[in-house]
Image: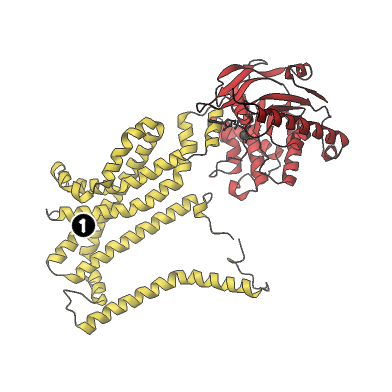
Amino acid sequence: MLQTMEPKTAEAAGGAPLLMLRDVGKTFSNGVTALGRVDLTIREGDFLSLLGPSGCGKSTALRLIAGLSTPTTGLLDWRGDGAGGRFDTGFVFQEPTLLPWATVFDNVWLPLRLRGVSRTEATPAIREMIERVHLTGFEEAMPRELSGGMKMRVSIARGLVTKPRLLLMDEPFAALDEITRFRLNHDLLELWQEEKFTVVFVTHSVFESVFLSNRIVVMAARPGRVFGEIAVDAAYPRDEAFRTSPDYAALCREASRVLVDAMDAGAGDDRP
Amino acid sequence: MTALDRPDVSLALDPEEARRVRAARFERVGKWLLPLAIMVAAIWLWDRICVWNEIPRYILPRPGEVLYTLYADAGLLFGSLLVTLKITFLGLALAVAGGVGLAVLFAQSKWVEMSFFPFAIVLQVTPIVAIFPLINIYVDNQTAKLLLCAWIVAFFPILSNTTLGLNSVDRNLLDLFKLNGATRWQQLVHLRLPAAMPYFLGGLKIAGGLSLIGAVVAEFVAGSTGQSSGLASRIIEAGYRLNAPRLFAALILISFTGIVIFLVLSLISHLVLRRWHESALKQER
Ligand SMILES: Nc1ncnc2c1ncn2[C@@H]1O[C@H](COP(=O)(O)OP(=O)(O)OP(=O)(O)O)[C@@H](O)[C@H]1O
Ligand SMILES: [Mg+2]
């Protein structure tokens, strides 16, 4: 349990760096500086949560990492064996954003299909992924026939079907009810532990970030920046018992405190 | 589905639910029965007016006589109908090809859309009757003239609807395609075209009727020059000869054709969309 205002000191622990954001900033054409000078190292195997008030640039950061947008300043430094890059990332949006005209099976096939993998070739991977998100039996269902939680499962299966090294998630469970969210939290952690991919997870929820992540990066607004980092050193696997443990409560308190500080700092700061 | 579709007889319904079931059943039947009843009443009244006022047959024929003409002149009328139908469907096919083709072209680049869309609007807002004399000068072939008219009238709803559809794709889905390195072609085939399908089919329903109107109007304008043989020229001819029964018979055939075209296109639309699009879903309460 360690909180620093200087994120670089936290680099000592954990896996090898996968991606380093160096001095990354983004200013939109309308003059909004969504991100100013962000330094952040994402390490192999991290479950890193980006926690922060609305408008602090979490989505912007995620889009930059995904390569959907280019930084105004600084650079993204992909490490590892050089095989990284945006084609090796999966993305899960806040809404399930499935193709409404395609079955669950075809929706999960999509990323492989766009890479030129035929249906037959892709079938084992798709079936496996559908099973991993507990949707076996729903292969031929249309998205509109599924509940919100099930749609999100399809979206996660689609994000992981290419076996990406990095999974980016932008408030994926924000629109779900709490019970469904707890289940998905649990299943996502299970997948993460088995598949050993790296996750960058954007959330508004202190509780969710503490339950899921090994690192919580708290951001502040105006301009968007890294305000502090909290290492969550509770052991995995984490189950529902963890949610009621004193450790969890203490971590939530700490994260809330940092978040409140970040919000104060963000509100007091004027635009550069 | 809900209990409204398959009311369970064994179920003890409270009065409110029972009333709802009754109302729903009545609505299902009434939807067809009421217009039909009005229609029959109107035809009966028409017949009575003819008899009561002793209106001569060359001014207003009795419904029975119109029906008889439809039977007696069947060879002539249905032959003409076939000619009109041919123009209508060829015109519609060309409108689909042209409308979708142009829309796809527009979707490739904002510049192309900005440059050419205004011309499509000009073509749409200029009344076809006003353009026809020009077409008459430049085009010799009678069928080609009529086709061109049907096409001009029918293609715009398809173009504008399909363009709208191709552009109204979920932004996140576009990002997803980009993230997975999709080519423009993949984006078109796997994302934009399916997303545009409901819009296209909506346009098609309008275009089907317009194509018929285009075919008939064109023939009317061309009719004075002689050589055509579609339903419109039958109407003109019957008008000259004060053959009101045949005039009415031809008119009924045209209306009927329009209704059938609309129903067929609605059915196609329903069949294509029924698995996924809201418009094709039964109302669920
Ligand atoms: N495409 C854009 N053009 C202009 N301004 C933008 C754009 N995208 C985001 N912004 C602005 O940048 C700032 C950060 O936006 P961003 O979406 O990254 O915040 P966020 O932390 O994800 O917020 P939320 O939690 O509400 O999703 C906001 O002030 C937003 O208005
Ligand atoms: Mg956001």
Q: Is residue A237 visible?
A: no
**Mark 1, other Cα within 10 Å: few <14 / some 14–19 / many ≥20:** many
Question: Position of A138 compared to A16: left or right?
Answer: left
Amino acid at circle 1: Gly
Question: Position of B49 compared to B180: left or right?
Answer: left
Question: Position of B114 compared to A212: left or right?
Answer: left
**Image quarter for ligand 1:** top right
Q: Which residue is mark 1?
A: B230
Image quarter hosting the N terminus of chain A: top right
Residue A219 or B228: which is nearer the viewer? A219
Question: Position of B280 compared to A35: left or right?
Answer: left
Which chain: yellow? B
The percent position of residue A82, horizontal first and vertical second, equals: 63, 15
Query: Chain for mark 1?
Result: B
Q: Name the colour assigned to chain A in the rendering.
A: red
Image quarter hosting the C terminus of chain A: top right
Quadrant of residue B103 in the image? top left
The percent position of residue A137, horizontal first and vertical second, equals: 67, 46
Quadrant of residue A262 in the image? top right
Q: Is residue A112 above or below residue B43?
A: above
Looking at the image, the residue that sits furthest to the right is A246
